[in-house]
Amino acid sequence: MQETWKRFVYPLIEDKKLNVEEDTYHRHIENQLMLLGWEPWKGEVIHKQSLRIGNRNRMEPDILIARDGEYQFVIEVKRPGNTQIKEEITQLESYMRQLRLDVGIYIGEHIEVFYDKPNTSHVLSVFKLAIDLEEKRGSRFVELFSKENFSKAEIVNFCEERIKEIQRQNSLNKIKENLIADAQTQIAESLKPYLLDKYGSSFSEDEIRGMLATMRFTASADGMQPEPKVVVTKPQPAPKSDLIKCVLTRNANAQGLFNPADQSLTVLKGSRINPVHLDKISSAGRKKRDILCTKYTEVKNGERIVREDVCFESPSGAAQFCVGGSSNGWSQWKDETGKELNVYRNSGNTKVVSSDSTKVRSKKIVDSRKIQLEFWTRFKEKLQAIGEISSQQSPRPQYWYDVRIGRSGVLLSNVCNTQQDFVGVKLYIRKPVVEKYYPALLARQKEINQALGSEPQWDANPTAQDKTIALFHKTDLSDPQNVEEALDWMVSQTLIFYRVFSKEVRGLY
């Protein structure tokens, strides 16, 4: 189960590193649900289905999971860089209650399971997991939500047990809080019998009580276990002297404080932001901004005013909130001297300590999305110049670039990994056609390797349902000279893989 969890979250971890848009993240989540056995072509993974509520209203849940024509649970998707707010869970709750579903799942910066316990005013958070390969409870999530094991009754039993665990932990925490709050009295009263027993022959009870009254006792909690629910945390502010005052005037009159330490930006109370959305704002962006405006702003005399300080993880997030749509906050926000915040952007070196603690090497921090967009743009240009592969996708700031080879479910999935410094070419065979193509290709492994002129990795992850045949090339993509060499390697190997596998796959029926 833990291996399945790792395969399930791995693409989501990559998406989180790249901070992809919600639509891209949404698509990847739907693909990963196939690892749990839910099949889109059987109508089991339903994308943004429009459902009628009453006579006039409609709702559109992000993902609905169904089996035998009956809804099983609902998933609310937010981008991996999201910071969950109350209104997002209220929206999930409305879907659950309209569809009479006991369980709903939130997938954004983490994964969280909510339960609609009978006779409660709101849904309850019962299970929260980090999007991490080493999340120990990932196997339990897979066990509960895989199609093979899924049972509404079992889910309800699990949620009820989790609520009991939470209540027990809350009771223990309450006792601890009371001890901390009343430490002076509790400790003094506990010590009095001990002191009377040990020193009672020399001192009276009044003398010992008087001595205790002159002492000050305190208690603090070490590792108090919190109730497992979402707590929305804002980046901790730097000391006032370290913060940079800044302003944004595009479609707004906003004041902010930029924190160079964590690159966050706080939009200050009293700022005036665009009361409407820009025409080109995405549907996801519009939805998110509506929620933020409802929570943090108010309209006065036709102007939308920020009513409390709002902290964003980056200047661009803050700029989108103020401007009303897509905006590069690093250039839109300016400090008191008129300089763009780009001058404060982290782009230097970070130290990495080797196993020998006396040796330190520097590794340049790279802008992954920028490098990947430039890499795939150049890659496409080089392929087009050769003219052998006619249909090519538009370059995007992501770690993969697909090349079609003329068969549904089989493609070349090229990769550019800036975190682990490698590029690669993969023949990617999707699960629905694995049994049709992979065994036949494997039977010709020797001949295919000879045609490729290399020995790629065949089925590097044998437990995965999709299959790959991959060749990788290590390189430091932060070095422009290496990028050019990597591009030449990628183009050359893509053409070889395309020639060999398009012919091999077309020959299989």
Image: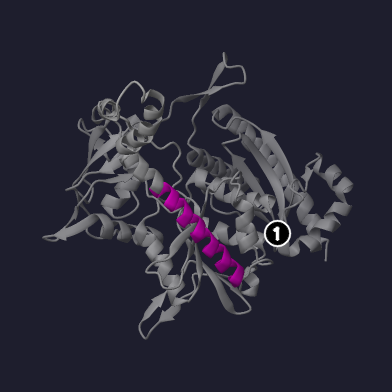
Residue 234 against residue 23 in the figure, above or below: above
Residue 405 against residue 74 in the figure, above or below: above
What is the secondary structure assignment of the residue under circle 1?
loop
Query: Residue 389: percent from the left, percent from the top?
Result: 66, 52
Kindly identify the amino acid type of the residue bearing the numbered disc 1: Arg
Dominant secondary-structure state across the stretch colored magenta: helix
Q: Is residue 83 toward the left or the right of residue 242 in the image?
A: right
Residue 423 against residue 213 in the figure, above or below: below
In the rendered image, the residue lying farthest to the top is 358
Query: Residue 384: percent from the left, percent from the top?
Result: 61, 48
Q: Is residue 467 magenta?
A: no
Q: Which stretch did the figure color magenta?
A: 152-174
Q: In which quarter of the image is the N terminus?
A: bottom right
Query: Residue 212: percent from the left, percent from the top?
Result: 29, 28
Q: Is residue 297 toward the left or the right of residue 192 in the image?
A: left
- Residue 336 is drawn in which quadrant? top left
Residue situated in front as seen by the camera: 439 or 193: 193
Residue matched to label 1: 430
Q: Is residue 236 toward the left or the right of residue 157 in the image?
A: left
Residue situated in front as seen by the camera: 217 or 3: 217
In the rendered image, the residue lying farthest to the left is 301
From this viewpoint, is residue 305 visible?
yes
Residue under the point 28% across and 42% down = 266
Q: Is residue 165 magenta?
A: yes
Mark 1 neighbour density, 10 Å: few (under 14) some (14–19) many (20 or more): some
From this viewpoint, is residue 106 visible?
no
Residue under the point 36% across and 23% down = 201
User: What's the coloring here?
Assistant: one colour
